[in-house]
Image (spheres, rainbow, N blue to C red):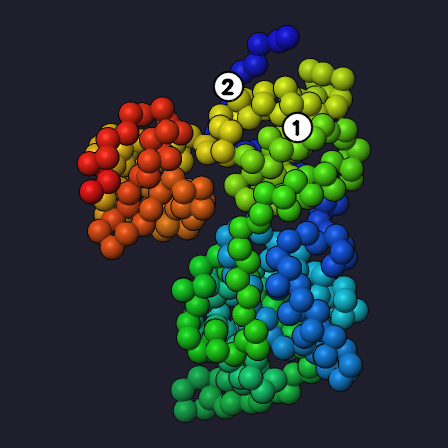
């Protein structure tokens, strides 16, 4: 066996074309989020029966849970084209106006990272969502004139990882809002098996379980780990992803059996060693970790809390007994008082 070089703890970027090939193309292929699928089936079915565009929809949740995939599945189900943009690109009122003035009948406008839409541009969106009107101002000062353009029926699907950063007026204009939750382990295993089949990679049941357990309850991470395991199996073994090759690739990526990366472990260790297990306030933890508070709240905490390794209380963050156990640090009961 060749000696392996160490790698960074964060997974490397992937070929976007390959990622697209793994994206579900039908509702049956979309595994998990059953309640959301049922609600969307109702909304889409009713819209098709009336010959209308579906209500505007808002999806929120952690990155990699399938928000973009849902938007494209809705477009396919409606037989409508999907035009894609992102919040950061909508900086000025003219950016929104340019998009809306070119909307085709029944087209779907998918806005990713919707919480980053500029507030001035957002105001142009309100009448478009509510009454399909586009209000334009031509000229400046006393000579300025306002024009209103009718927009054909269309649907905005917005996605965000930070729903709290969306303004109340914007949120209220969506006909339905859905939160995508972390996936169950059995669903992640089904996704891995499906993706392995698409990739033409043989994989053992043991390897599926190992990769699923380390996938942070997230399909995107599961697919990335699967592709790295496939690479390892092709280079160092006979091409089939085995229990051994799955463990090896996690070691190379410095990902442990629960899916914790170096920064996850360091966060827990800082709480335990620097703050006696907690409670510790977010600002203090952010300073000790040299990480933005929003990153701790949005990236690390949901996953660690989902595993039962971290608790968030009114007094601050606390490392649980399971965190001590996972890091092989002796646990003292008084640390959690």
Residue 121: horizontal and vertical position, in percent? 48, 72
Residue 159: horizontal and vertical position, in percent? 55, 62
Kindly identify the residue that appears in the image at 42 percent across and 75 percent down.
168
Badge 2: residue crowd in 10 Å (few <14, some 14–19, many ≥20):
few
In the depicted view, which residue is nearer to us: 139 or 194?
194
Label 2: element kind: loop
Mark 1 to mark 2: distance in Å?
24 Å
The vertical placement of 19 against 114, above or below, is: above
Observer-side mark, 1 or 2, equals 1
In the drawing, what numbered circle is on residue 6?
2
Q: Is residue 224 left or right of residue 333?
A: right
In the depicted view, which residue is nearer to us: 16 or 22?
22
Residue 134 in view of the camera: no
Kindly identify the residue that appears in the image at 78 percent across and 39 percent down.
198
**Which residue was labeled with disc 1?**
206
Residue 196: horizontal and vertical position, in percent? 74, 36
Kindly identify the residue that appears in the image at 41 percent across and 42 percent down.
308
In the picture, which quadrant includes the N terminus?
A: top right
């Amino acid at each position: 066996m060749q000696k392996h070089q160490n790698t960074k703890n964060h997974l490397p970027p992937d070929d976007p074309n390959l990622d697209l090939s793994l994206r579900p193309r039908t509702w049956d292929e979309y595994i998990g989020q059953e309640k959301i699928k049922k609600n969307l089936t109702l909304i889409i079915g009713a819209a098709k029966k009336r010959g209308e565009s579906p209500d505007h929809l808002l999806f929120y949740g952690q990155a990699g849970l399938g928000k973009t995939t849902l938007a494209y599945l809705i477009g396919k189900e409606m037989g409508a084209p999907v035009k894609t943009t992102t919040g950061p690109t909508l900086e000025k009122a003219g950016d929104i106006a340019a998009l809306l003035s070119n909307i085709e009948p029944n087209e779907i406008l998918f806005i990713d990272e919707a919480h980053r839409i500029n507030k001035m541009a957002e105001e142009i969106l309100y009448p478009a969502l509510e009454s399909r009107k586009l209000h334009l101002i031509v000229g400046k000062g006393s000579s300025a004139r306002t024009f209103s353009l009718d927009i054909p029926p269309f649907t905005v699907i917005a996605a965000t990882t930070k729903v709290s950063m969306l303004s109340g007026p914007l949120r209220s204009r969506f006909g339905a809002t859905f939160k995508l939750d972390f996936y169950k382990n059995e669903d992640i295993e089904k996704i891995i098996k499906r993706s392995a089949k698409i990739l033409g990679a043989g994989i053992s049941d043991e390897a599926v379980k190992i990769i699923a357990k380390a996938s942070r309850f997230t399909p995107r991470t599961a697919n990335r780990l699967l592709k790295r395991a496939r690479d390892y199996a092709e280079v160092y073994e006979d091409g089939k992803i085995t229990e051994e090759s799955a463990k090896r690739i996690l070691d190379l990526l410095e990902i442990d059996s629960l899916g914790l990366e170096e920064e996850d472990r360091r966060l827990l260790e800082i709480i335990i060693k620097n703050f006696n297990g907690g409670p510790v306030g977010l600002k203090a933890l952010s300073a000790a970790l040299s990480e933005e508070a929003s990153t701790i709240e949005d990236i690390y905490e949901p996953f660690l809390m989902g595993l039962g390794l971290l608790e968030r209380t009114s007094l601050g963050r606390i490392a649980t007994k399971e965190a001590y156990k996972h890091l092989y640090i002796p646990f003292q009961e008084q640390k959690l008082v």
